[in-house]
Amino acid sequence: MKTTVETILEVAHAVRRELMLSTTDSEGWCFETSCMILERLTKAGVQAYLVQGHVQVSHRRSYFHYWVEVCDYIVDATGDQFNKWMDPRDHIPAVLYEPAVNRPYVKSQVYSLPPRVQYEWAFALKPIGAY
């Protein structure tokens, strides 16, 4: 039997592989990718949330972004799109799974999606709290 962490990593890597079949760059794919990760984790019984916020790439620059969180851990399969603006020591891997406090991710809204969600996710979002 897989652990929760193994399930999270397996799902995130699978979604990343599928994304890379249709593009060579993860830029602009954060919402769709995060929704896919969220749906698969929910089906696997993992309580996860879609987070809207921004990634602070330098002290003066940040970019709007979506990612998934599980128990205060960031699950992000598109964060590497920001590496071109970041110090190499701070680069984000292709699939990130780390405690939220370790990365420059700033939440603005957290969403919970119903278990059966299709690609109309944008209309089905249910805010559960603002940060």
Image: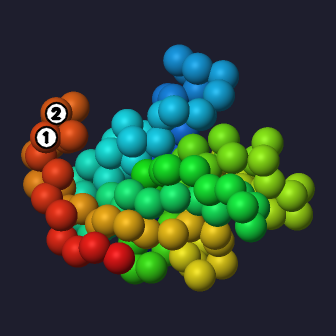
Q: x%, y% of residue 7?
A: 44, 60
Instruction: Indicate left or right for 9 with 80 as reference.
Output: left
Q: Which residue is rendered at x = 52% and y = 58% of the image?
A: 54
Dot 1 corresponds to which residue? Answer: 123
| Residues packed near mark 1 inside 10 Å, few (<14), some (14 to 19) or many (20 plus) | few
- Which residue is farthest right? 88
Q: Which mark is residue 8?
A: none
Residue 51, given in percent of the width and then of the height, sits at: 37, 61
Dot 1 and dot 2 residues touching (CB under 8 Å): yes
28 on left or right of 88: left
Q: Nearer the viewer, residue 115 or 55?
A: 55
- In the displayed orientation, state which residue is furthest to the top: 22
The quadrant in which residue 131 appears is bottom left
Taking the view exactly as shown, the residue that stands out farthest to the front is 60
On screen, residue 102 versus residue 74, left or right, reads right
Instruction: Name the spot of residue 100 as percent of width and height, x first.
Output: 55, 76
| Element class at badge 1 | helix
- The residue singled out by tag 2 in the image is 120
Report how far apart the C-alphas of labels 1 and 2 lie in the structure: 6 Å
Task: Please identify the quadrant where the N terminus is shown.
Answer: bottom left
- The vertical placement of 54 against 103, above or below, is above
In the image, what residue type sits under mark 2?
Glu
Can the viewer see residue 10? no
The amino acid beneath tag 1 is Phe
Can residue 33 be spotted in the picture? Answer: yes
| Relative to 66, residue 58 above or below | below
Q: Residue at x 59, y 34 (%)?
A: 26
Task: Count neighbours of disc 2 (C-alpha within 10 A) and say few if under 14, some if 14 to 19, many if 20 or more.
Answer: few
Q: Secondary structure at mark 2?
A: loop
User: In the rendering, at what x and y percent does residue 97 appear?
Assistant: 58, 65
Residue that appears at 23% across and 74% down: 129
